[in-house]
Amino acid sequence: MKNFILSKLTFLFILLSLTQLSSCSKESSGTEINLTYQMLSDKTWYLDYSITGTSKKTYIGQSTYFINFLKNNSTKDSDGFEGTYTIKKIGNVLQIHVQAKTSNTNTVEYFYNIESIGTYNLILYYTLNGATVPTKLFFNTKN
């Protein structure tokens, strides 16, 4: 009888654990997106260097590219692009979708995949059409 009760309890524990895992996936995706917004916004992100394949280009100590992501979902960068951004999770990848206008009012749209984000560091990557190797961009907030 004791083994029967123990096996039933074990079964219930496993069933509850699996239910918890499957029930929170959509909610955790929303939480992950909200946390990414919080960590990304109201900061100026400065490009330190980029890597494409084995080629590394450094911008440390130079006038460099920067981008601002604001809490009101607007964005502005050092190239003069101004617009809005959203964060989406496509498959298993967090992405920043930007819709902006150039200083000549031409519309541009681009996407960055987020490899990692921290309080002071951000790693993004993208692959241009026809390219086989992604370009990684390494940013910091200079704090």
Image (tube, helix red, strand yellow):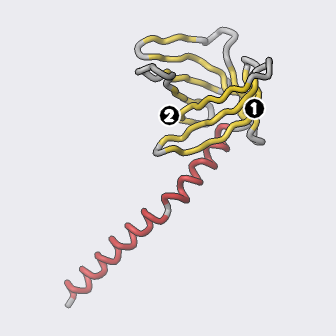
Check the image and name the residue furthest to the top: 62
Rendered view: 123 above or below 10? above
Q: Where is residue 105 in the image (x, y as percent from the top left)?
A: 79, 22
Residues tagged 2 and 1 counted as in contact (Cβ below 8 A): no
Q: What element carries label 1?
A: strand
Q: How far apart are marks 2 and 1 (CA)?
A: 23 Å
Residue to which mark 1 is pinned: 83
Rendered view: 92 above or below 25? above
Rendering quarter of residue 108: top right
Say left or right for 132 vs 98.
Answer: left
Rendered view: 47 above or below 37? above
Rendering quarter of residue 16: bottom left
Report the amino acid beneath label 2. Answer: Glu
Residue to which mark 2 is pinned: 115
Q: Residue at x 50, y 34 (%)?
A: 115
> Callout 1: 10 Å neighbours few (<14), some, many (20+)?
some
How many discs mark residues in the rendered view?
2
